[in-house]
Every structure is written in structure tokens, then in C-alpha cells.
Amino acid sequence: MATIEKSGEEGALLLSQNRHWRVTRGKTASEVVIALEKEGLPEDWRDFKDFRLEIPVDRWNRVVKHIRTDRKLFGGVVLEFANQEEQLPAVLGHDRLYGDLQRVMQDATSSLVESGALVLTAVDLSPE
């Protein structure tokens, strides 16, 4: 369920959150921001603390359809949305981070659908 975020970005709509990731609506309603939770990161992951994906809502279906497919394919799809492209392979290479990312994106998808911001469409899972 989407709630208004009380801390962090003022007035940001929190779509989903777990131990490692936070998903909010971006500065505009047409964008979703997926960011690592800085406080919960182990010391050896601190290099990733500013990593974030900024995905336009109209591209969300294209991204989320690959979240449970091949990790490399998913990385290729989200590469253009990463603020620090060079960190993407390392972030997706961590099994716990990737597993939590999968779960938080699925929860965010439910929140987007419930709020009416997203309509799910049938997709072909073959590589684009």
C-alpha cells in the first residue's frame, strides 16, 4: 500500500520498502525512483550508497517484466536508468541485494496498479 513518506524526500510517495531498497515516486509523478537504503548497508557495500534507478512510469512494464528473468538481461534493460552505470553490475551481482530488489519492485508494481498510475499489459518475455 502506498503511503506518504514522512522523512527523506519531502512529500515523496513511498511505494515500497525493504531492508536494502526504497521505492518512491520521483520529483514528477511520471517517474519512479529505486534507491538503496543507506543506513542498512553493510560496510563492504558502502560504495553503493548513492546508487539509484530512475525509471519513467511509462517504461515500468518493460523493466518489471524482466525482474524474474536473467540477471544480465535485467541489467541491460535498467542500464539507461542507473545514475551510476559503472556500479550496476556490482549491485546486481550481490544475491541479497538483487533478491531484495526483485521483491521491492514487485511490491511497488502492486502499489502503482492500486493507485491507478500503472496498467499492466501482456508482454512477450523474449529478448528485445
Image (spheres, rainbow, N blue to C red):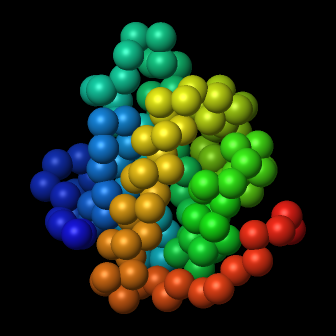
Q: How many marks?
A: 0
| Residue drawn at 50 percent across, 50 percent down | 102
| Residue drawn at 45 percent across, 18 percent down | 46
Instruction: Locate residue 6, reporting x and y percent.
Output: 13, 55
The one nearer the camera, 87 or 121, is 121
The one nearer the camera, 62 or 86, is 62
Instruction: Locate residue 100, reporting x and y percent.
Output: 43, 41
Confirm whether residue 51 shows in the render: no
Residue 121 placement: quadrant:
bottom right
Instruction: Locate residue 68, reporting x and y percent.
Output: 61, 55
Asked whether, in this view, residue 100 is left or right of residue 127, the answer is left
| Residue drawn at 62 percent across, 35 percent down | 92
| Vertical placement of residue 33 versus 120, above or below | above
Asked whether, in this view, residue 41 is left or right of residue 68, the answer is left
Asked whether, in this view, residue 71 is left or right of residue 33, the answer is right
| Residue drawn at 18 percent across, 65 percent down | 4
Q: Quadrant of the N terminus?
A: bottom left
